[in-house]
Image: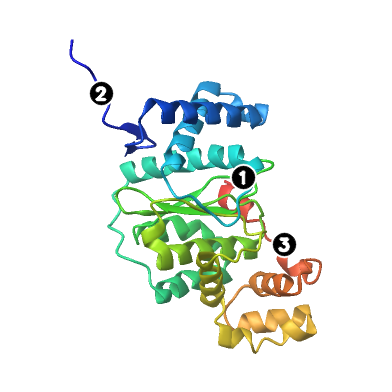
Amino acid sequence: MSDCKFDSLIINGKADSNTDSKSIFESYLESQAQLERLPKKLKQDNNLVQLNLFKEVHFQKSSNLLFRKSDSSNDALVNFWLSKVKNLAYLYNDFNELPDFTGLSKSDLKSIAKGNSEPGYIRNLEKCLSARGIIFIVEPSVVGLKLDGAVFKLDSGHPVIAMSLRYKRLDNFWFTLMHELSHVALHYDQLDSYIIDDLDLKSEELTELEADKLALNSLIPRNIWRTCPARRDLQADSVIKFAEQNNVHPAIVAGRIQHEINDYRKLSSLTSGIDTREILFSE
């Protein structure tokens, strides 16, 4: 009887060449360790969760995973979440006729960002982005997950933007979205691996600094932001007036000021009134 050899192992829809028995066994052991660290309520379908964790761990062994900042205690939850996102992305690609992705310019980002003044516009983002060949996935966060968003591309070349809605605020939603889209515009060639973002953490990585800068400028151009009186007087009326003049939602202006002064109590009446989870998931 002739020897039988697998040339590749299918990992989340992608053939992986790292199939030697030692590597597979190491991935299995690591996925088992991560499975043990998951909360019990996330393991109701234990076999499926175990399989998905194994696939993620093994995929990442042969990929250059880019974290905004790595937190090993968070690995199990991150991989659990990523496995769900990736499965949804492949299903979306299989069941929809997406146009080829042909690139994303800075002017494209500004065009997408223009919708931020109307909170309900976020319901249209899936359609808006899919028309550009981009898959948009919202997979709700789980308790303890330190992650806001992720971006990667499928074998087909279609970028995938994934968001967890860890925070429900409108300003957080839009900054996270524009940050991930900025990675697509600036770092598309690096997206064979994930870029995973915990935006609570300050990063000095060049890719993250570039994405931060482009995201901020797409929402409010730097030359306009410099003229914002509310940055100095910290008054809600000033925020609202500036927002109206520049067709930006007041929550985005207030949230940016809060981040700059590192005080999320200031102007909180303007940032806490809109629940993006409710907008996206309520009937």
- Residue 71 in the figure: left or right of residue 231: left
Residue 161 can be seen, yes or no: no
Give the labeled residue for mark 3: 273
Q: Whole-percent x and y of residue 2?
A: 18, 14
Q: Whole-percent x and y of residue 110?
A: 46, 75
Please identify the residue farthest to the left as the structure is shown: 2
Q: Indicate how the structure is coloured in the image.
A: rainbow
Q: Secondary structure at mark 1?
A: loop
Determine the CA span between mark 3 and mark 1: 20 Å
Disc 1 marks a residue whose amino acid type is Ser
Question: Which label is found at residue 5?
Answer: 2
- Residue 160 in the figure: left or right of residue 211: left
Determine the CA span between mark 1 and mark 2: 40 Å
Give the labeled residue for mark 1: 141
> Quick one: 215 or 112, which is closer to the camera?
215
> Quick one: 75 or 143, which is closer to the camera?
75
